[in-house]
Amino acid sequence: MKTKFKFLSLSLVVVLVLSIGAIGCRRAPKKVTPPRNNTNNYAPNTDMNGDDRNRNDNTNIGTNRDRINDNTNLGTDRNGINDNTNLGTDRDRVNNNSMLERSDRIAKKVAELNEVNSATTAITGNTALVGVNLKNNTEGTITSDIKNKVQATVKEADPAITNVVVTADADLIERIENVGRDVRNGKPISGLTQEIEEIIRRVTPNM
């Protein structure tokens, strides 16, 4: 009986020793070290956390800002719109040049008449306002015959003119010359129309 008990006790001791040895030999879990060249701030095969997503979103926002800045180059397109707006000034310049050319051509033809010393002309629409300085005329009057000659000469020089207003009044001639001077200085025709119409009313009140 004692022998059997000793054998059982010895067996238990052996089992206990083997168990302790097995526990002592178990390997500790290996610590995962992220690669040194990993610049993404997260370990491989792991999900990005919220901060990383936000960081990427911010980067994308930066890209979007760049894209918005690219669209800001539409400022060039705005400057195109402003340029188109400036076309109004260009049109005025073209209109001025056209009026000057036509007015000079008409005045030159009228001045070639035997009864005329000099002539000045302003145009508005299809109407020509002509001031004539007549030979041997100090009263500022004009005969119907001379007026008809001037009107025929104007329409021949510029077929687009259908109405011709003629005056020999010194004051009105000076006002017509001032209109021509303003046009040459670049003042828009639209700003002179009222003055021209006022002169026309002075010459022909019933027109």
Image: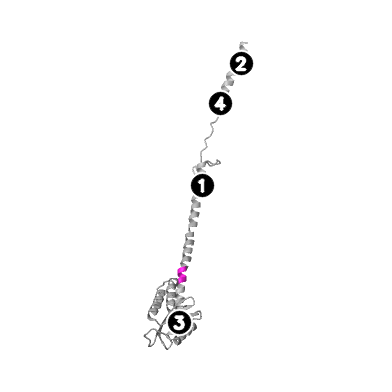
What label does residue 106 carry, if any?
Answer: 3
Dominant SS type (magenta):
helix
Q: Nearer the viewer, mark 3 or mark 2?
A: 3
Q: Residue at x 61, y 13 (%)?
A: 5
Return the residue nearer the eye: 138 or 178.
Answer: 138
Residue 138 within the segment the image draws in magenta: no
Dot 4, crowdedness within 10 Å: few (<14), some or many (≥20)? few
Q: Nearer the viewer, mark 1 or mark 3?
A: 3
Residue type marked 3: Ile
Return the residue nearer the eye: 205 or 121.
Answer: 205
- Secondary element at image label 2: helix
- Secondary element at image label 4: helix
Q: Where does label 2 land, which residue?
A: 8
Q: Is residue 22 left or right of residue 106?
A: right
Magenta residues span 88-92
Q: Is residue 105 visible?
A: no
For the residues labelled 3 and 2, the Cα–Cα distance comes to 143 Å
